[in-house]
Image (cartoon, grey):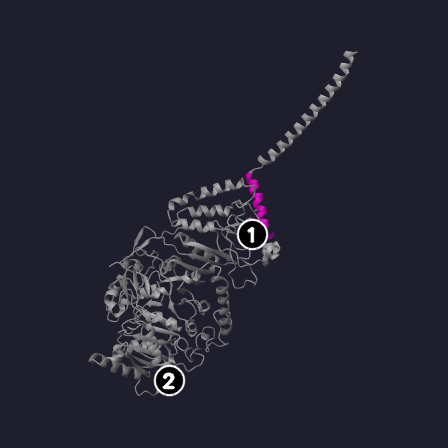
Amino acid sequence: MAGGSYSHLGGRKLSDWCSKITVVTFLGISFFGIWMLISSSSFSIPIQNSEISSTLKVSKNILGQDFPVNAKREEDETFQGEKGFRRGRSLKEIEDEETEGDSSNLRNEEENQENSESSSSGDESQSGNESEEVDSREKDSTSSGGKSDTGGEDSNTDENGDLKLESEKAKKGETENEIFPAGDQSEILKETTTQNGPWSTQAAESEKENESQDSSSSKGYKWKLCKTDAGPDYIPCLDNVQAIRKLPSTSHYEHRERHCPIEPSTCLVPLPSGYKQPIGWPRSREQIWYSNVPHAKLAKVKGHQNWVKVTGEYLTFPGGGTQFKQGALHYIDFIQQTLPQLSWGKQTRVILDVGCGVASFGGYLFERDVLAMSLAPKDEHEAQVQFALERGIPAMSAVMGTKRLPFPGKVFDAVHCARCRVPWHIEGGKLLLELNRVLRPGGHFIWSATPVYRKDVENVGIWEAMSELTKSMCWELVEINEDKLNEVGVAIYRKPTSNDCYQSRKQNDPPMCEEADDSDAAWNITLQGCMHKAPADSSAHGSKWPAKWPLRSEKLPSWLRSSQVGVYGKAAPEDFAADYDHWKNVVSRSYLNDLGINWSSVRNVMDMKAVYGGFAAALKDLKVWVMNVVPIDSPDTLPIIYDRGLFGIYHDWCESFSTYPRSYDLLHADHLFSDIKKRCTIASVFAEVDRILRPEGKLIVRDNAETILEIENMARSVKWKVKMSYSKNGEGLLFVQKSFWRPKQEQIIKSAIA
């Protein structure tokens, strides 16, 4: 009984216990199965597939449905999608056709791009580790769970914070398609590329690898340092020692004229020892670094005349000169008081200062809204033009010898000569007749020299000869005055506005030029001892005085007519207006803000291919001056530029420019390089750009996409910082900054060594 009862109860307990074991076992197996599934999901999917999946997802979110996910591989292995973006940068629309309301807060470049390029100017041996660093970052980001370092989602921000779609949509209430329109509705630089969160791209990897290689040879460019007698001051066309040696005569300063090497230089000019960033304007007008222009000869020779002095580590400029010991401003006001009709900065805007010394006269004329082109030979008085440019004053190296000056006829409002010691009266007045060519009808010649106020035999003889010459040229002596304080005098002449005086002369001496003689022809033209007639046709430039400044910067020159076809194919007035609107738009909406340029550090600017001067006119309210260069194979629009109250020069970019190295803070080239490479090597032009641009100076290039890529590769090869690069529909823009890097190997320039 007892045993039977026990047997019954024990069997039920055993059954219950077995059931529990069965349940536990089942649950254990189930949990094990689930764990296996999770483990399989976590570890059996290849990372490559996950990476592709993430990339596809991000590409779809960021670039829109119609944007191709598979980026096209360019020759330089950079990313180039349908919209023309490269290198995964955040970019901003600069083109003037961009619609109003576009976002203005996108970055121009990535911080990691800037860091990699700044480090490339240091120890090149470290760059070989960059690809390994990329791999390590990829491995770290693989385990980050699809989030960035800051914890944000891939589609919200990259590691640099360049892209924040969700926050922008929240602020603006915009949809994804409105921010990043697809297809032909999208505007370049309205879209933003990304680093795709933690996932690297093939384009980024390839770019890092390219940058890690030796930049001086990775693209086939092997730059060397110019070894010449001129050293850091080398100007190829003015330092051709071999050509100068072969000159049969130097009596007309032929040795100071341009003698360009047969083969243009492709080497880089060295920096002076201890070179520093130039002092900014307006402080630079008073002092510059001695180490940048280490020449003391002029200070020793002219120090007592208040030109320039060595003061510790500076060269200082007291603001005076031989003719204005009490200061340039006093002298400028003295001239204005002598002839109020000059009306500095209104009626008289653009002048030529011949024999400028260190250009203090031109430097202080800026306070009167006058733009002076200062002119002097190289090394006639050691480094005087170089001093002027380092101070931030417009100047160029040139001499009045056997060739015409590289300016059009009838463009300067006034010509100034303060004790310039030019023998105007000799050889039939040939040199003074050249000034007559470039002087606007009704313009003034301001002559402040010893023959005006000294009464010794030599000076009296020169004055009498000048009086006879100017009278025969029909110049009217309108005023002569003496500055008691400075103990100097000034004579002011006026060029006639009509041909009446020329026709009434008893003798044709100096003779009138032939009708076929074009007064605007100035590139490598031999000086002619003749005078050009005043324009009788109202459709000729110089027939009417331009509007007063600053209105003249915007006003269409009176001689441009609707019947004339402009450079861009429209009627000339419409062409002129469209060009100005274009550059005002580009400058105000992009160049002044979106390129990251500190314009307070920019003073000397060059437009390497000016058309109507619209770029310079758009910058007129800044404290900068612009040298407008009209290439000799471009339409001759330089007279228009002068009529706008601006100035410029003719030049052939297959030769070196007549300026010292490190002269300019910013160069602007609009479709110059694609044109010039039809006639000469683009490498030589780039070497010239490097020569005249200051370290940390900027270059802005607008050109076709192929040329942009070529210039960018050259810039990288000399370790310049690429700040922006993009293309759209075959056109592009490049913005780069020059570095202090110089190659170690030298190239002997035989033509420049005695």
Query: Label 1 amino acid?
Result: Lys
- Can you give x and y, in whole percent of width and height, for residue 675 in the image? 43, 62
Residue in the foreground of this view, choosing between 458 and 526: 458
Judged from the image, the secondary structure of the residue bearing numbered disc 1 is loop
Q: Is residue 67 visible?
A: no
Residue 98 in the magenta stretch? The answer is no
Q: Name the quadrant of the C terminus.
A: bottom left
> What numbered label is drawn on residue 12?
none
Q: Residue furthest left?
A: 457
The residue lying toward the viewer, choosing from 616 and 679, is 616
**Where is residue 37, by image quadrant?**
top right
Q: Is residue 64 on the magenta stretch?
A: yes
Horizontal and vertical percent for residue 287? 32, 64
Q: Nearer the viewer, residue 688 or 563?
A: 688
Q: Residues within 10 Å of mark 1 (few under 14, many from 20)?
A: some
Query: In this view of the protein, can residue 640 be seen by the observer?
Result: yes
Quadrant (top left, top right, bottom left, bottom right) of the N terminus: top right
Counting from the top left corner in percent of width and height, residue 604 is at: 39, 64
User: What residue is shown at x 24% (from left), y 64% (from top)?
Assistant: 297
User: Label 2 is placed on what type of residue?
Assistant: Asn
- For this orientation, the residue located farthest to the right is 1
In the visual, does 480 lie left or right of 144?
left
**If you read the primary sequence from the N terminus, does the residue marked by circle 2 or circle 1 appear first?**
1
Which segment is the magenta one?
Answer: 47-69
Image height of 143 relative to 357, above or below: above
Residue occupied by mark 1? 164
Disc 2 to disc 1, C-alpha distance: 70 Å
Q: Circle 2 is placed at which residue position?
A: 499
Residue positioned 46% across, 78% down in the render = 558
